[in-house]
Amino acid sequence: MTNKEKVIVNINGQEFSVLGNESEEYILSIAKIVDENIKEIMQKNKRLSQSMAAILAAFNMADKYTKTLKELNEIKENVVEPLKKFEQMKNDLNNSNLKIQGLRDECNSYKDELLQSKREIENLSKTIRQYEQELKKKEDELAEALKTVENLQNKLFEDQVEMVQLRKELREALKMLGMN
């Protein structure tokens, strides 16, 4: 249960006992506003009775309250819509940041894959260079072997020609000697 404040207030020269949930200062400030409104109305028209002045003051305060409430609602509408837009923009920004982070992660993944691919290419290029060097060496060895084979074939041919010549000479010599 809430504590109720009992406050004695003076409005247009009359004392009233007011019971409320608000602080004494608040209740006194409200009573002062009512008192000032009634006194202002009575000063403008001295022929009004106290009850008529109170009714006019209540009417003026109700008018001011209604206009202020309408203005407050308009302000709320003017503030609420931008706040909704702000919240939507904030959500959009958060979503965009999440997407950006996802894209950064994906980009980093691609960078890692690219780096790995570059390493593999470097290793394959190194292996290819080694194979090319070995191939060149084998080609040089093959060329040398072919040269040796050609030299041996030439030597063989020359030896065969010499042998045929020697046989011919041997046959002639044997013929001359009468051995054949």
Image (spheres, grey):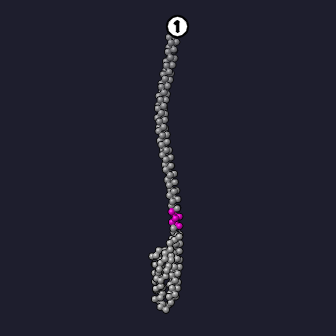
Image location (x, y in percent) of residue 167: 51, 14
Secondary element at image label 1: loop
> For this rendering, which residue is in front, 162 or 123?
123
Is residue 87 part of the magenta span, yes or no?
yes
Q: Please provide percent x and percent y for residue 152.
A: 49, 23
Q: Quadrant of the C terminus?
A: top right
**Residue drawn at 51 percent across, 71 percent down:** 2
Image coords of residue 74 (percent x, y): 52, 74
Q: Is residue 170 above or below residue 40?
A: above
Decide whether the magenta segment is chiefly helix, strand or loop.
helix
Outermost residue, bottom direction? 47
Q: What amino acid does circle 1 point to?
A: Gly
| Vertical position of residue 27 compared to residue 152: above or below | below
Which of 98/106 is in front?
Answer: 98
Q: How crowded is mark 1: few (under 14 residues within 10 Å), some or many (20 or more)?
A: few
Q: At x 49% / y 82%, what residue is drawn?
A: 16
What is the magenta range?
Answer: 84-90
Instruction: Kindly identify which residue carries mark 1.
Output: 178
Whether residue 145 is visible, yes or no, is yes
In the image, 21 versus 70, the foreground residue is 21
Residue 71 seen by the camera = no
Image mark count? 1
